[in-house]
Amino acid sequence: MRESFSIPQTGYPPSDFQTGLCAFYSDCGTCCYGLCCFPCMACSIAGDMDECCLCGINMAMRSVYRTRYNINGSLCSDFMAYVCCPICAICQLKRDIDRRKEQGVF
């Protein structure tokens, strides 16, 4: 008997991140926070996601977040975002978390 593989349903319709990767202008405060204290922002995001702050922020956390909220992308796109501009990637993730909190879906 052949087993089938299915992707778990998240309950959220497919979407993109709510801001672009380099959308500094959409939330200057978050971008300044990320530039001035990258480790602090990483711990803030880890706390928001109920993860351990000591593990650090990385592409895996971004992938978990994307999967949880059914955001379009791939492991490869997560990897490239963190390799090319880790500050942009972490700020985008924080902006999305903050917006979902405001919308009551986080």
Image (cartoon, rainbow, N blue to C red):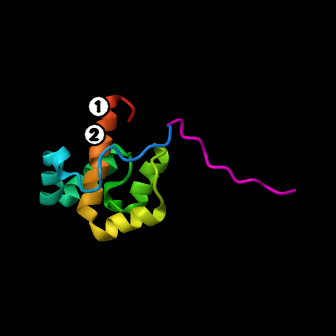
Q: Residue at x 59, y 41 (%)?
A: 9
- Up-down relation of residue 37 to residue 71 (above or below): below
Kindly check if marks 2 and 1 are in contact, taking CB atoms under 8 A apart as contact. yes
- Up-down relation of residue 87 to residue 8 (above or below): below
What residue sits right under mark 2 in the picture? 98
Q: Residue at x 33, y 43 (%)?
A: 18
- The amino acid beneath tag 1 is Glu
Residue extending farthest to the top is 104
Q: Quadrant of the N terminus?
A: bottom right
Local crowd at mark 2 within 10 Å, few (<14), some, or many (≥20)? some
What residue sits right under mark 1 in the picture? 102
Disc 1 secondary structure class:
helix
Q: Quadrant of the C terminus?
A: top left
- Up-down relation of residue 60 to residue 18 (above or below): below
Q: Tell me the CA gap for discs 2 and 1.
A: 6 Å
Q: Which mark is residue 40?
A: none
Q: Which residues are magenta?
A: 1-12
Residue extending farthest to the bottom is 83
Disc 2 secondary structure class:
helix
> Residue 90's quadrant in the figure?
bottom left
> Residue 89's quadrant in the figure?
bottom left
